[in-house]
Amino acid sequence: MKWSKNSWRSYEAKQMPTYSDEKKLNGVLDNLSSMPPLIFAGETRSLKSQIHQVQKGEAFYLQGGDCAESFSELNPNTIRDTFKLLLQMSVVLTFATNTPVVKLGRIGGQFAKPRSSDFEEKDGLKLPSYRGDIINSYEFTKESREPDPQRMMQAYNHSASTLNLLRAFAQGGFASLTQLNKWNLDFASNFESTQKYKLISQKIEESINFMNACGINENNTRELRETDFYTSHEALLLPYEEAFTRVDSTTGDWYNVNSHFLWVGDRTRDPDGAHIHYLSGIKNPLGLKVGPSTNIDDLKKNIEILNPENEGGRLTLIIRMGAEKIQSTFPNLLKEIDKLGLNITWVCDPMHGNTSTSNSGYKTRATYNILNEIKSFFEIHHSQGSIPGGVHLELTGLNVTECVGGPEDIKDENLGDRYHTFCDPRLNVNQSLELSFLLADLLSNGDSL
Ligand code: PEP
Ligand code: CO
């Protein structure tokens, strides 16, 4: 079938809410279709070429943010702290490897969540599951769980103000390398990773002072003053994505102008389904989650549908097997796909295959499983002569207690202290920074820092 921005409607669309008021739904979608774009097609083309560099081993890919953004947590400090954390992690990685880091936030649109079950039951009451703030509300009442189309307008407005702030942070001086020590101030701890980070920032400061003396400074060099930061989210709620699917006047091609990068989740990656069909027609760089139940033939079909012209940087496969399963499933999958000799960027999501329920009833993840899955991902690539491109993480710049382990050695019984996520558990600042040092070691064979 010929692609158009609404042709996905003829395919089976999994994980979609049922809106009871179609007139209201269409009214909101009409309004959204005339709203200004959040990003420009040209920006997604730059991102695509940077992801192509990742594929060739000339850059590292770092994608991270909330599992689910929430309307109530939209707060400038939270956005700043997550942005800052991603910058700090990329400083560690760039310093260790002398290669640039492509920074993508799971931010500015990560509002829709796939669910394993359509219903949730509590104290004998059975209600529709929470599907993310763009669809319904987290509160466990009948009214809150009813999908409300007006929430899409709120999601757009939240994304617009988030992006506005991110652009200001990335280009307005906050991200300047001369500010490195200021990003540091709230690191009051004595963890090994904190100390190592301080050391790196001192060394960078020395280099900057040297460059200043040579006449290279933030006034005449954009790279010292600004950074590129891209947004991404799961393309799940297709009516919303359709409203932001527009023709780029420069090339005449279709782009999603809501987010730079979109990915398809592990539950909606059916090659005959609506999500894959929708993504096939837009030119943004794309991600495809690859979980343990992936069938190689389906994966090959998806690669063919999503990247028929074998364009570099177009398709990133995000492997999310789990610390154990990656050992048994990934080597063969990598071999089979590598044989095709196609342009594929390989990224590891060590979060979604490592979720468990703690004794205290919290959904959690153990940092040692997260670190182990990343290690295996690197080892498997190295043993097959292929390139591990980067990581896709759920993290926050807040000091939460959602994943166990890490520098503070968070235990089951500590999870309740600051457990704030609306969906999956995220790495906190210290856990994320520790992970960036592990990555730095893996990337430089242990002798970088
Ligand atoms: C996610 O990234 O939040 C997610 C639901 O992932 P997956 O589709 O891999 O389960
Ligand atoms: Co998640």
Image (cartoon, rainbow, N blue to C red):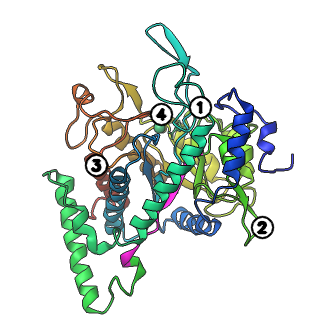
Q: Nearer the viewer, residue 230 or 295?
A: 230
Q: CA distance from mark 1 to mark 3?
A: 32 Å
Q: Residue placed at 32% from the left, 39% from the top?
A: 367
CB of mark 4 near ligand 1 (< 8 Å): no
Residue 311: x and y, percent?
68, 63
Q: Residue placed at 55% from the left, 31% from the top?
A: 136
From the image, state whether disc 3 or disc 4 is nearer to you: 3
Left or right: where 192 falls relative to 446:
left
Residue 352: x and y, percent?
46, 36
Q: Which residues are magenta?
A: 224-234
* Secondary structure of the residue carrying numbered label 4: helix
Mark 1 or mark 3, earlier in chain:
1
Which amino acid type corresponds to the residue marked 2 in the rendered image?
Answer: Gly
Within-10-Å neighbours for mark 3: few <14, some 14–19, many 20+ = many
Do callouts 2 and 1 mark residues in contact (Cβ within 8 Å)? no
Which amino acid type corresponds to the residue marked 3 in the rendered image?
Answer: Val
Mark 1 or mark 4, earlier in chain:
1
Q: Residue placed at 60% from the left, 51% from the top?
A: 262
* Circle number at residue 293: 1
Q: Quadrant of the N terminus?
A: top right
Residue at which label 2 appears: 252
Whether residue 183 is visible, yes or no, is yes
